[in-house]
Image (cartoon, helix red, strand yellow):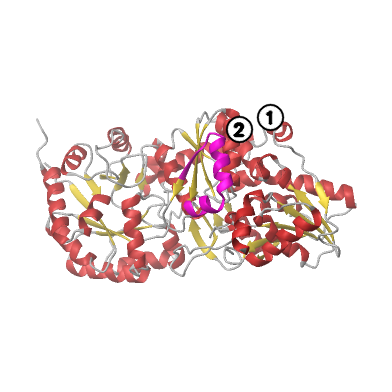
Amino acid sequence: MSAKTLVVYLMAMPDTPELAQAAVDAGADVIEVGFPFSDPLADGPVIRRAGERALAAGMRTRRCLEVLAEIRARVDVPLIPMTYASIFDAYGWGELERDARAAGATSLIVADLPADERQELHRVQLVAPTSTDERVRLAAEATDGWLYLVTVTGTTGARAELAPSLAPLAERARAISSVPLYAGFGISTGEHARAAAELVDGVVVGSRAIEAAEQGPAALAELVGQLRAGLDAPVAA
Amino acid sequence: MTATPTRTFGEYGGRYVPETLIPALDELEQAWASLRDDAEFRAELQGMLESYAGRPTPITRVERFAPDQRMYLKREDLMHTGAHKVNNALGQVLIARRLGKQRIIAETGAGMHGVATATVCARFGLECIVYMGTEDIRRQAPNVERMRLLGAEVRPVEFGTRTLKEATSEAIRDWIANVETTYYLIGSCVGPAPYPELVRELQRVIGREARAQILGTEGRLPDAVVACVGGGSNAIGMFYDFIPDEDVRLIGVEAADAASLGSGRGGVLHGARSSILADEDGQVQDAHSISAGLDYPGVGPEHAWLRDSGRAEYVPCTDDEALAAFHRLCETEGIVPALESSHALVRALDCGAELVLVCLSGRGDKDLAEVLLHER
């Protein structure tokens, strides 16, 4: 059985290095680090509010890069800043890519940058249930390491059930490309993770991780442990 | 063979949206490319503009308001629903019908676009949901009641600045979640391509009519054409057919504390790269204006390009200046202008042009309570 990848999203805050370490110790394989933006169109209320708190705490781009470097000093898993185009546009597209990698980033995600915009920026591409096969192919060919499958037609945020739209999207992406597929948006429990693991190579947990992280490292570790157990559980015969 | 609609204006524009929306933007772009020059579509739109919405609107000489100039107002305030917004709403709802969408969403600031959208949805029997910040709901209460009367659902947006910026973000989030059934009827020449071009083309009727009217009345082109700029739809519609007339100055007037063009920097907001009010990290800053329709930290990408190219100039106007012009037009001409349009009147008076044409983009009935509150 091949191991499934668990990606945990945390908003960049002064205490994120400690939280990231707790998540990795509990079984997270990749950490996404949110660089907050004032108008996050792809995000539901949980991540939007986390971004508002981060901005109020002074988490501007340079401070986020410092936190990224502090996380890198504690963990050796892939680290992926996730942000919005306006942050890159203000800092300089090439400059932010360079400085993020120097601070320990292994890739990048830009939530409002579809595959055919700014193609020179190498990053993890997202596809959605609405994406045509042609768009999936474009994203899969351009993506950096793995393809991010948005499970739902919607914004980020926990849902009660794993979206039924994931299975057909995963099936289409498999037929088009051999890149690893990780699913995100709406995945919040070990059961979701287990169900998704039957379809894809990994999952991304964002809003639920943000909520747990607000309770501290122990609560985050407990959630990550549950997600890890869900992902690693043997598939029912 | 139809040309591909414009996606960028110099370094501005683009489609900075989550991937989920791209297929819907592709679909809209293809529909617009075929409809733009389609005789049947154009005839249907023109028929509705004339028989339902009141086009053409006149130009009115305002000798008592501007005794030292030959000033004409392009009377978009006389349009059905009270502003130029219905030009765009009618055009887009006809596109939505051709795309088979039954659910229409919109954002609104002053409420004029929300009313125009609610109106055309009532006319065609479509579900209508309008996002509006709670601060704007407070200061534009009559328009909220009008939207409800017309059968629209007004969804309050209670976070951030509680104005047009957040209402737009929430409308886009709704669109992301419901994109397969929903048409996003954006109210200005902002947003991802093809909206900036689409809205410009639907508002061009303002300038096309006005240019012919001033030529007919004065026998020559104006020295200056003036319009207020929030997102910039009445201004781009007024300016566009004058762009080749190099001797005609094009003057856009922004609220002084919402001057995305005068005080902004390059940045990405609501799906397009443009000139926005943002800090050095790209975080969008709050705009402030007594006029809800101008209280927006972004602007259409084509205006940023017209500014950079030098073809149009963009100047600020304070709340107090706009209020003074509001009263002056009421008292000298018997015309109650929208506070938005009052900004254009201020700079039209002191731009130094002898023959000047101003877009009076809307009427001010909606603003009476806010004016009284401000002056109490």
A90 versus B365 height, above or below: below
From the top left corner, tell me how far across and down residue A19 is, in percent. 19, 62
**What is the three-letter code of the residue carrying label 1?**
Glu
**Image quadrant where one finds the N terminus of chain A:** top left
Residue drawn at x 23%, y 64% is A16
B31 versus A82 height, above or below: above
The numbered dot on residue B44 is: 1
Q: Quadrant of residue B117?
A: top right
From the top left corner, tell me how far across and down residue B287 is, in percent. 53, 63
Check disc 2: other Cα within 10 Å, few if <14, some if 14-19, many if 20+: some
Residue drawn at x 40%, y 37% is A130
Disc 2: which chain? Answer: B
Q: Is residue A10 left or right of residue B218?
A: left
Q: Nearer the viewer, residue A40 or A84?
A: A40
Check disc 2 and report the residue beneath it: B94
Q: Nearer the viewer, residue B375 or B107?
A: B375
Q: Which residues are magenta?
A: B134-155
Q: Quadrant of residue A75?
A: bottom left
Q: Quadrant of residue B231?
A: bottom right
B203 versus B279 height, above or below: above
Asked if the magenta segment contains residue B144, the reply would be yes
Asked if the magenta segment contains residue B123, the reply would be no
Q: Nearer the viewer, residue B191 or B132?
A: B132
> How far apart are the two marked residues, 1 and 2, measured between alpha carbons?
9 Å
- For mark 1, give the secondary structure: helix
Can see residue B16? no
Q: Is residue B255 left or right of residue A86?
A: right
Disc 1: which chain? Answer: B
Which of pointers 1 and 2 lies earlier in the amino acid sequence? 1
Q: Are marks 1 and 2 in contact (CB under 8 Å)?
A: yes
